[in-house]
Structure formats: C-alpha cells, structure tokens
C-alpha cells in the first residue's frame, strides 16, 4: 500500500512531462509535509489533538520508512509545538529529503521511471548544466486507483475510508482539487466536501493548519520537479 506522501506525488505528477504540475513551491512543500504528518498519525506514532497541546509523540518505534522515521525523530527531539508550527518548520527543513526519498521509493517499486537528461549547453551564460531528472509513470494502476478513490469520496454516498477523507482534506486545503476535477464537478460537491472534512479529526486538524498557512503566506513561484 502506498503511503500518503507517495499518493500526493503521484497525483501532482504531470504524466506527459515528468515534472510536477505548476502548483507552486510552497504548496508542494505543505502538501508533502502534511501528508507525512497524517501518515504518522495513522500509524499511531503522533497525536495531533489540539486539546492536548498540539503534536505529541505517542510511540517512537520506527515505521520502517525513512522519510516517516526522520520526521518522527525530529518531532520527538524538538520542542513542543502545535500542528501549524510543526508543518511550517518541517516544510522548510525536510521537504527536499521527503521528496527525494519518496520518489526513490516509487522508482524502486517500479511505479515510476527516472530519466536524467544529458548535459546541455546554456546559450546565454555559456555554461554546462544538468537538467533536472524527470519521472514518468510506468504502472498507472496506482495513480488511477487513487483518483478513483477520491472520486468515490466526493461523488458517492458510501462511507469513505478515513485515509481517503484525510487525503481529500489535505489536497483541498492546498487548493489542488482543481487539478483533479473540473470546476463544474467541484461545484456540484461543495456541500459534500464540507461534510467529508468533518468526518476525520486527523485530516481536519492538519488540513486546517495547512489552509491557514496557505492564507497567510504568499505563494512562491511554481517550479519544476528537482
């Protein structure tokens, strides 16, 4: 089973170009950091209950996933902070590592293929530079399954799985649903989306923190996958 950070990267990957969709650097950072914290909560490693003072570590045992375990250790060894503060801190400190490790895991699993272009000459500065690697979906089954699950959360009356609700909360908070569904589709499910957000405490608390950061911090320029 894919972890939430892997699902976020797959959803945001442009299948034709092998780069991330133009969602903005800070949005990508928040989505990745939020997904890792959600995964740790689902793994019963952290608690995000604001009534207990924010984020607390309830089990320091490793999960076996490097990006999750590094984040867990950082939270365990850090000063107590609320959800918003941890997301802001980790999005600056850890996003690059999370992204690199998550992409490597997807390549190792055979879900993605990594391609690095050869050296090319930059005509203006007359410098030799490396192009960033690109990642192409090898097995589209996983990505189609994620999109199908999210579609069912929004357009079906069935009771959704808490992980799917959390993922919807996160990508909704990051304003990323517009890349997955048309404006007409989203307009049809506004009330249901609000209803789903109330169904899962983990997703609701982390997504609320992400949404607040999105509102109060100007978005960085969109950037390619690096």
Image (cartoon, rainbow, N blue to C red):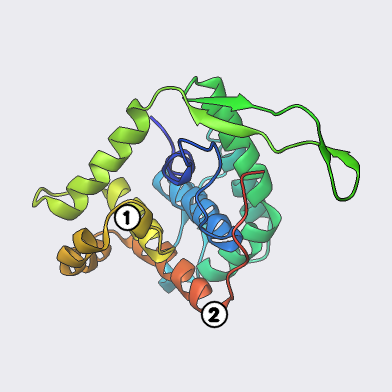
Residue nearer the viewer, 226 or 49:
226
Q: Earlier in the sequence, mark 1 or mark 2?
A: 1
Quadrant occupied by the C terminus: top right
Q: Which residue is mark 2?
A: 216
Tell me, for residue 110, which label it has, or none.
none
Q: Looking at the picture, how far across and down is residue 103, in whole percent? A: 57, 34
**Picture coordinates of residue 12, whole percent (x, y):** 46, 46
* Quadrant of the frame with the N terminus: top left
At x 50% / y 21%, what residue is drawn? 109
The reply to whether discs 1 and 2 touch (Cβ–Cβ < 8 Å) is: no
Q: Using residue 136 as the reference point, say whether residue 125 is left or right of it.
A: right
- Eyeballing the image, is 159 above or below 62? below
Q: Which residue is most to the left?
A: 157
- Say left or right for 195 vs 180: left
State the mark number for residue 168: 1
Please name whichever residue, 219 or 39, is drawn nearer the observer in this view of the structure: 219
In the displayed structure, 14 sits above or below 38; it is: above
Q: Nearer the viewer, residue 115 or 42?
A: 115
Q: Residue furthest right?
A: 126
């Amino acid at each position: 089973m894919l972890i939430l950070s892997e699902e976020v990267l797959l959803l945001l990957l442009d299948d034709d170009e092998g780069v991330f969709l133009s969602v903005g650097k800070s949005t990508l950072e928040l989505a990745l950091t939020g997904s890792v914290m959600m995964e740790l909560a689902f793994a019963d490693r952290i608690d995000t209950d604001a009534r207990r003072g924010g984020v607390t570590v309830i089990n320091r045992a490793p999960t076996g996933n490097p990006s999750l375990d590094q984040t867990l250790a950082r939270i365990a060894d850090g000063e107590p902070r609320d959800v918003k503060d941890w997301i802001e801190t980790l999005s600056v400190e850890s996003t690059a590592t999370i992204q690199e490790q998550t992409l490597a895991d997807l390549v190792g699993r055979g879900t993605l293929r990594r391609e690095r272009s050869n050296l090319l000459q930059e005509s203006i500065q007359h410098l030799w530079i490396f192009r960033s690697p690109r990642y192409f979906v090898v097995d589209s089954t996983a990505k189609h399954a994620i999109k199908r699950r999210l579609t069912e959360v929004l357009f079906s009356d069935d009771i959704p799985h808490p992980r799917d609700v959390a993922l919807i909360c996160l990508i909704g908070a990051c304003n990323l649903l517009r890349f997955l569904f048309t404006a007409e589709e989203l307009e049809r499910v506004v009330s249901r989306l609000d209803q789903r957000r109330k169904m899962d405490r983990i997703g609701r608390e982390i997504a609320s923190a992400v949404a607040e950061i999105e509102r109060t911090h100007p978005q960085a320029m969109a950037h390619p996958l690096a």
